[in-house]
Image: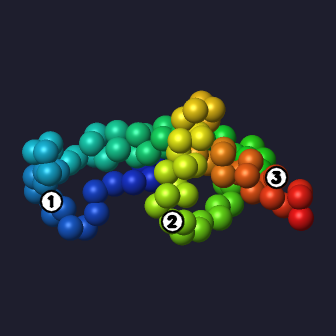
């Protein structure tokens, strides 16, 4: 099997290169790193839109007190702050 990723031209003929933890970077190191990245791509929260898609985000700045109150409600209800915000937004839009 041809390797898609390999040491680049900055690593000259047999030169030993190390990462910040002192591990030698060789082809096996590169292969393991690529495998780790591919394994992690399947992780994360499930999409709220459809499987295999990234859910869109809405970001807003809020006063510190509002953030604290949302966090308190989330903790009391055993939900994430995101879930509480989504529910509040849905309720607000349905009431409009």
Query: What residue is shown at x 54% (from left), y 69% (from top)?
Result: 61
Q: Nearer the viewer, mark 2 or mark 1?
A: 2
Task: Give the alpha-carbon distance from disc 3 to disc 1, as whole Å.
Answer: 64 Å
Q: Which residue is mark 3?
A: 91
In what element is the residue under mark 1? loop
Depth order, front residue of 31/47:
47
Is there CB contact under 8 Å for labels 2 and 1?
Answer: no
Tell me which numbered mark, 3 or 1, is placed earlier along the sequence. Answer: 1
In what element is the residue under mark 2? loop
Task: Give the alpha-carbon distance from disc 3 to disc 2, as whole Å.
Answer: 21 Å
Depth order, front residue of 78/45:
78
Q: Position of residue 56 (x, y in %)?
A: 68, 60
Q: Position of residue 58 (x, y in %)?
A: 65, 64
In what element is the residue under mark 3? helix
Q: Position of residue 92 (x, y in %)?
A: 81, 58
- Disc ID at residue 82: none
Q: Which residue is mark 1?
A: 13
Q: Is residue 74 left or right of residue 49?
A: left
Tell me which numbered mark, 2 or 1, is placed earlier along the sequence. Answer: 1
Q: Is residue 30 left or right of residue 11?
A: right
Q: Is residue 17 left or right of residue 44?
A: left
Q: Which residue is mark 2?
A: 63
Depth order, front residue of 51/70:
70
Tell me the crowding category of disc 3: few under 14, some 14 to 19, or many 20 or more residues within 10 angstroms, Cα based. few
Q: Where is 4 relative to 57, above or below?
A: above
């Amino acid at each position: 099997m041809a390797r898609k990723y390999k040491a680049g031209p900055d690593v000259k003929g047999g030169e030993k290169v190390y990462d910040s933890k002192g591990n030698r970077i060789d082809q096996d190191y590169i292969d393991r790193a690529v495998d780790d990245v591919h394994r992690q791509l399947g992780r994360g929260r499930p999409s709220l839109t459809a499987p295999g898609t990234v859910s869109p985000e809405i970001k807003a700045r809020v006063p510190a007190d509002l953030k604290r109150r949302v966090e308190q409600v989330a903790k009391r209800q055993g939900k994430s702050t995101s879930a509480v915000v989504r529910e509040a937004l849905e309720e607000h839009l349905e009431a409009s």
